Amino acid sequence: MKFTKMHGLGNDYVYVETFSQPAPADPGELARAVSDRHFAIGSDGLILIMPSDRADARMRMFNSDGSEGEMCGNGVRCVAKFIHDHGIAARPRVTVETGRGVLTLDLTVEAGEARLVRVDMGAPILRAEEIPTNLPGDPVIDVPLEIGGKDFLLTAVSMGNPHAVLFVDDVAAFPLEALGPLIERHPAFPKRVNVHVVEVVSPSEVRMRTWERGSGVTLACGTGACAVCVAGVLTGRTGGRILAHLPGGDLELEWPDRDASVFMTGPATEVFSGTWPQA
């Protein structure tokens, strides 16, 4: 089975295209196998790039624990780069079918390769039951939740997948490795949740760290950065256009108004390709 290792700001996945080869029989098990950073390729999970009758390609993503996720913002940028650079859809604007629906992506191309990708991520989902969460409020804005014996204020947003955003004074000092899994699996989130801690630098700039559902700490989360942009506006902490500093690099986010899509711009990088002996 042919694969390609790619990343968006260090949020790395093993990509398998099924245009020229069969899809893996058990992608969840394959995700667990290839993601091992000591005995395999090493990644945050597996993404399949598949034919679609609605778009240039279809994307399915699996976390490193084998669970399937609805959406991955860094992943969809890499899918766009792959289908452009490998001739599946060699155009500066491509479409990708995701668990969120069909997304449109605009590529900045240099020397025949996509370097930056701007994604129309769609409008955020703010109704509690659709995120889903049983926290009070509709939308759920700065709602207190007890974690590890301490109350934190959470804002809940879905970008096709669920996110909990916590604004803190010092993002580097927050015990994400300890509290991230407790929030991820809290009963308030019946489908678990991605967790983001955010330090506001200015109304147009934030620093953030992420605990991803099913993967743990990652260097970046594209849908999470979109959720942070939305949460910043909802709580009055930021404007609708921000630069987000993640451990793996920077993303530009825009939420022009509350009825609009969120737009995300960031890089996509191909690292290497190879053959995996098991399909």
Image: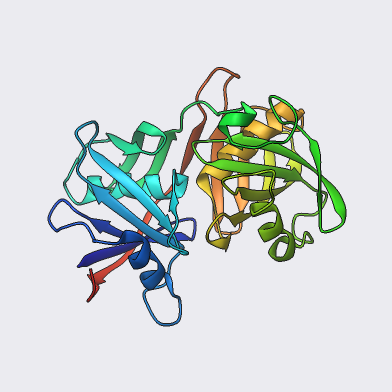
Task: Give the camera-side residue of 215 and 121.
Answer: 215
In the rendered view, would you say 211 is above or below 135?
A: below
Task: Give the camera-side residue of 212 and 198.
Answer: 212
Q: Residue at x 24, y 73 (%)?
A: 276
Would residue 123 appear left or right of 145 to someone viewing this image?
Answer: left
Q: Quadrant of the N terminus?
A: bottom left
Q: Residue at x 69, y 24 (%)?
A: 138
Would residue 42 appear left or right of 245 to someone viewing this image?
Answer: left
Task: Give the camera-side residue of 243 and 56.
Answer: 56
Query: Given the current orientation, which residue lies at the most extreme right position?
Result: 150
Residue 169 in view of the camera: yes
Q: Quadrant of the C terminus?
A: bottom left
Q: Residue at x 27, y 35 (%)?
A: 92
The image quadrant of residue 29 is: bottom left
- Looking at the picture, the colour scheme in use is rainbow
Would residue 144 appear left or right of 85 to someone viewing this image?
Answer: right
Residue 127, horizontal then vertical, whole percent: 61, 26
Query: Given the current orientation, which residue lies at the most extreme bottom position?
Result: 39
The image quadrant of residue 229 is: top right
Q: How many marks?
A: 0
The image quadrant of residue 188 is: top right
Residue 172, horizontal then vertical, whole percent: 75, 60
In the rendered view, would you say 20 is above or below 254?
A: below
Residue 196, horizontal then vertical, whole percent: 66, 49
Residue 144, horizontal then vertical, whole percent: 82, 40
Query: Given the current orientation, which residue lies at the most extreme left position?
Result: 20
